[in-house]
Image (cartoon, rainbow, N blue to C red):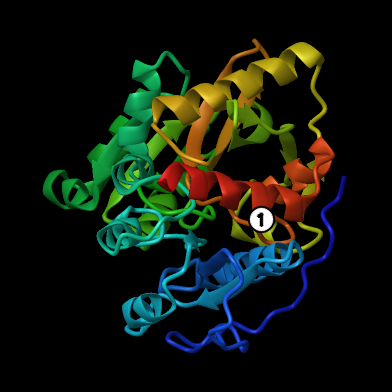
Amino acid sequence: MTSPAPVPTEPAAPGAPLDPSPHDGGRRSPLVVVLAGGLSHERDVSLRSGRRVAEALRSTGLEVLVHDVDADLLSFLRTTRPDVVWPLLHGASGEDGSVRDVLDMAGLPYVGTGPRASRVVWNKPISKAALLDAGLATPDYVTLPQSLFRDLGAQPVLDTILRRIGLPLVVKPTEGGSALGVTVVTRAEDLPRAMVECFAYGETALVERAIDGVELAVSVIEGADGPEALPAVEIVADGGYDYAARYVAGETEFFAPARLTPQQADLVSDVAVRAHRALHLRHLSRTDMILDRSGTAHVLEVNVAPGMTEMSLLPQAVAASGHNLSTLYRAIIDTALVSAR
């Protein structure tokens, strides 16, 4: 199933108001504030996610305001006193737990994982260690700071990487999302450039073995009976699932549900739920994995703030499940309100 073309949006300037509809004081209950934007490399994706979620929630009769993360935010939250906040922020501050810490200090309920677990997930090597402790598979990896290359010399370190991990391998920043700074390396001569591109997005690189298999994303939603997996979405992208493949229409082919046997579908669903629980996540998450030819599901990373754009994977999984997107988002809001009591 090929993803529909994205609806064009104009990125707002940092600090600009994101929602033209003022809060008029005549509150309907509950009032939801969606946080979108921020100053990370993924600002535009966050804006698109926030607007689409706001539209979906309004269609259920909720009052929804959208606001950027700027110097006005805390004053705005004190004035409006929303019943619940939905942080749809990607990248640093949005996913590293810091904004969630502020919401906790302000005493505001919010959708999603708390700050401590968010920090674990945000750091890929730490989250991979937690997944291994829970008995889940993840590709073999090493973590290397940029300073190590200066101290030991770039070429000796690169040679050691190739001996230890082998080819093909994947280089990615230890923190971040949307595949920014991620390179699949199939030739030794391409490794230096991959490291340079990675260090443009962070001081530390995660180098892991590339796994050959079916690339999948499995979203998890918490309901009254606990976390449940939505149908897996299969990703087929020539040249790797990079930023353009994620957000430019026509670059990637998606199959929702994934082309799996019932047994494979059950396996990857179980892995996603186990990852959600092992990392102490809340309300929703998305686990990216590769199912290899031997039937092992290797967890690549877990996301506490999945994208909600027209090309994002969680909305595609909702459609494949037969649920109404607006109704499911409303159910997530209701779950967040209940868990805050």
Query: Left of 299 or right of it: where is 252?
Result: right
Q: Indicate the quadrant where residue 288 lies.
A: top right
Query: Left of 99 or right of it: where is 213?
Result: right
Residue 238 visible in the snapshot? yes
Q: Which of 261 and 114 is in front in this view?
A: 114
* Residue occupying image coordinates x 74% and y 36%: 234
Q: Indicate the quadrant where residue 254 lies.
A: top right
Q: Nearer the viewer, residue 69 or 312?
A: 69
Classify 72 as above or below 148: below
Pointer 1 local density, CA inside 10 Å: few below 14, some 14–19, many at least 20: many
Q: Mark 1 points at which residue?
A: 246
Classify 170 as above or below 46: above
Q: Indicate the quadrant where residue 14 lies.
A: bottom left
> Please, what is the three-letter code of the amino acid marked with disc 1?
Arg
Q: In which quarter of the image is the N terminus?
A: top right
* Residue occupying image coordinates x 48% and y 30%: 276
Q: Position of residue 9 (x, y in %)?
A: 69, 80
Query: Left of 51 or right of it: where is 17?
Result: left
Q: Where is residue 80 in the image (x, y as percent from the top left)?
A: 44, 78
Classify 122 as above or below 307: above
Q: SS of the residue at dot 1?
A: helix
* Residue occupying image coordinates x 75% and y 43%: 318
* Residue occupying image coordinates x 31% and y 46%: 119
Q: Position of residue 15 (x, y in %)?
A: 42, 86
Residue lying at the far left in this picture: please name it.
151
